[in-house]
C-alpha cells in the first residue's frame, strides 16, 4: 500500500492520468498530485450523485470537466475564467446545462461552456485533451466542443426520442465518436479533420429512418425539445449499430463498395442483402 485516503462521504468515481488523481464525491471533487499524493485543490459542486465528470487522459493538457450549478451569462462563455473556483452551490441550486472546464495544472477555471439547456448527463474528453463531448438528460443531441476554447465544433442528432446516455467515447485519434443509450443502440459519428479556429460546416447526421430511435410518430415543432430546435436534420446513412437482444443475433457492419463519398458505417444484422453493401465484418 502506498497511502490511504479518507473522505467525508462515499467515493462515487475515481479519475486519473499520469500526473493527476481526481476523487469525485456527491458534492465535492478532490484533486491530488499523483507523484506525492498531495492534495492540490477541493472543488465544491452541486449534488452530483451520478459522478458526472471527465478528466483528460493527457497529462500535458489536463482538464477536468464537470456540470455547473450556476448558469453562465449568455453574453460570455468565459466569465468564470477569472475565478479560481466557482461559487459554492446552495441547497436550492440545481444542475444547469453548462459545463465547467477546470485546469488541473493551473488550478483555475479555464472556461464555462453553455453546452445544453437541460442538465448534463454525460461528459467525455478525447485522448489529447482538446475535445469535449457532452450530452444532456434528454439524450437527443450530442455536441463536441474544443477545450479550453469552448468552440462548438460538431452537433449530432442521436434520435428524436429522449434516452439516457450510458457512454460516450472518442477513438484514439479522435476521428470517431461512439455513443450508447438506453434504447439498445450504439451510434458512431465521424469527426472531420481538426482545423485550427474554424467551425465544422459538415451536415449534422441523424438516425436513419429504420433506426429504433426514429420509429416514433413525427413530432410537431412545438414538441421538439430545446436542444433539437438548433439542428439542421440530415437524413442519410448514420454510423449506427443496433442490438435487438434476440438470441443468436450477430450485428454486422456493412461497408459500401469502394467509395470515398461515404463517411459512415451502417449496421444491418441478419439481412440477406447485406452483401450488396460491400464487405461484411
Image: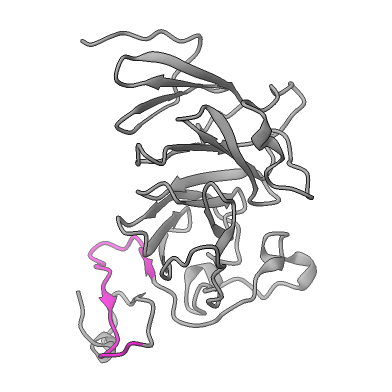
Q: Quick one: quadrant of the N terminus?
A: top left
Residue in the picture at 71% in, 51% down: 117
Residue at point 52%, 74% (across, down):
205
Is there any visible trace of residue 243 in the rendered image?
yes
Residue 6 in the image: x percent, y percent?
41, 7
Which residue appears at 46% of the width and 30% of the height? 104
In this picture, is 280 found above or below 32? below
- x then y, percent, for residue 210: 48, 78
Residue 130 as seen in the image, left or right of residue 281: right
Task: Identify the main secondary structure in magenta.
Answer: loop
Frontmost residue, 208 versus 177? 177
Q: Nearer the viewer, residue 222 or 48?
A: 48
Is residue 155 in sight in this rendering?
no
Q: Per the image, is 245 magenta? A: yes
Q: What number of labels is visible?
A: 0
Q: Is residue 207 above or below residue 62?
A: below
**Relative to 230, does residue 272 appear above or below in the rendering?**
below
Relative side of 114 to 259, left or right: right
**Foreground residue among 184 and 117:** 117
The quadrant in which residue 110 appears is top right
Position of residue 106 measured from the top left corner of the image (x, y, whole percent)? 50, 29
Tell me, yes or no, whether the highlighted magenta stretch contains residue 192: no
Q: Is residue 25 above or below residue 223?
A: above
Q: Position of residue 233 (x, y in %)?
A: 61, 77
Using the rendered view, name the quadrant where residue 174 is placed. bottom left
Q: Which residues are magenta?
A: 240-260
Amino acid at each position: 500500500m502506498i497511502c490511504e485516503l479518507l473522505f467525508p462521504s462515499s467515493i462515487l468515481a475515481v479519475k486519473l492520468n499520469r500526473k493527476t488523481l481526481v476523487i469525485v464525491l456527491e458534492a465535492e471533487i478532490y484533486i491530488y498530485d499523483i507523484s506525492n499524493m498531495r492534495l492540490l485543490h477541493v472543488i465544491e459542486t452541486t449534488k452530483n450523485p451520478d459522478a458526472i465528470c471527465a478528466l483528460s487522459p493527457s497529462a500535458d493538457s489536463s482538464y477536468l470537466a464537470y456540470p455547473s450549478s450556476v448558469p453562465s451569462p449568455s453574453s460570455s462563455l468565459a466569465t468564470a475564467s477569472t475565478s479560481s473556483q466557482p461559487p459554492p452551490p446552495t441547497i436550492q441550486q440545481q444542475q444547469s446545462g453548462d459545463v465547467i472546464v477546470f485546469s488541473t495544472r493551473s488550478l483555475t477555471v479555464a472556461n464555462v461552456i453553455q453546452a445544453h439547456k437541460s442538465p448534463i448527463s454525460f461528459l467525455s474528453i478525447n485522448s489529447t485533451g482538446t475535445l469535449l463531448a457532452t450530452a444532456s438528460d434528454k439524450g437527443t443531441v450530442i455536441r463536441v466542443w474544443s477545450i479550453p476554447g469552448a468552440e462548438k465544433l460538431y452537433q449530432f442528432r442521436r434520435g428524436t426520442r429522449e434516452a439516457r446516455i450510458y457512454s460516450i467515447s472518442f477513438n484514439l485519434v479522435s476521428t470517431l465518436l461512439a455513443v450508447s443509450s438506453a434504447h439498445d443502440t450504439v451510434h458512431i459519428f465521424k469527426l472531420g479533420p481538426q482545423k485550427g479556429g474554424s467551425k465544422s460546416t459538415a451536415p449534422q447526421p441523424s438516425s436513419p429512418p429504420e433506426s429504433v430511435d426514429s420509429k416514433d410518430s413525427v413530432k410537431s415543432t412545438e414538441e421538439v425539445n430545446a436542444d433539437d430546435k438548433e439542428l439542421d436534420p440530415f437524413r442519410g446513412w448514420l454510423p449506427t449499430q443496433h442490438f435487438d437482444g434476440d438470441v443468436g443475433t450477430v450485428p454486422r457492419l456493412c461497408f459500401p463498395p469502394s467509395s470515398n463519398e461515404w463517411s459512415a458505417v451502417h449496421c444491418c444484422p441478419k439481412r440477406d442483402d447485406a452483401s450488396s453493401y460491400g464487405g461484411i465484418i
